[in-house]
Image: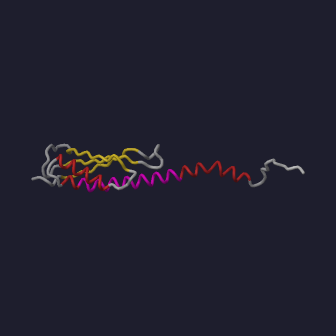
Amino acid sequence: MKINKRLQFNKGSGEFVAFSVVAPLILSIVIMMCAYIQLTVAIREITNALSVSGRSAAVCTSFEDAEAQSLLVAQSAITDRNISNISIKIEYASGYTEWERGSIILVTIYADVDTVAPFLTSGTRSRTMVVTVEGRN
């Protein structure tokens, strides 16, 4: 009795070949969609943290106090574990040089965002907000 071990590529085998060629492309698209969703959620959380940290800077009594307080507020407002290295930069808007009521400052938050597609969507993101100082007479 002779056993034929030859592979038979008959009708229907083309679908498996086509799927094996297209599957990495489909998987890449799904990964990119997940990365952009992660990025969108992270940017929304950074923007929300900027809002509360800007408000906390506005009611402080000094520039140094505003830097320290707004950083603490931003770090506590961000809970996403894909966001790290949070920092705050506060600077006077043009024309303002002293911390007094009515002065305008720019509050910028910087944070590193990690996603499932590190080569395209991960990296440092920043957002800036204009704030009017309310904390000192």
Asked if the stretch drawn in magenta spans residue 46, the answer is yes
Depth order, front residue of 123/78 = 78
Estimate the x, y position of residue 12 in percent, counting from the top left: 74, 55
Estimate the x, y position of residue 131 in percent, counting from the top left: 22, 52
Q: Is residue 61 left or right of residue 87?
A: left
Residue at the limit of the structure toward the front, as seen here: 1
Q: Is residue 89 left or right of residue 7?
A: left
Estimate the x, y position of residue 108 in percent, counting from the top left: 28, 47
Residue at the (20%, 43%) spot, across then down: 94
Depth order, front residue of 89/69 = 69
Q: Which residues are magenta?
A: 30-54
Depth order, front residue of 98/89 = 89
Residue at the (44%, 47%) spot, across then down: 121
Residue at the limit of the structure toward the left, as seen here: 137
Q: Is residue 102 left or right of residue 72?
A: left
Protein image colouring: secondary structure
**How would you classify the magenta stretch by its main secondary structure?**
helix
Asked if the stretch drawn in magenta spans residue 39, the answer is yes
Residue at the (50%, 50%) spot, across then down: 32
Q: Number of marks in the image?
A: 0
Q: Quadrant of residue 40?
A: bottom left
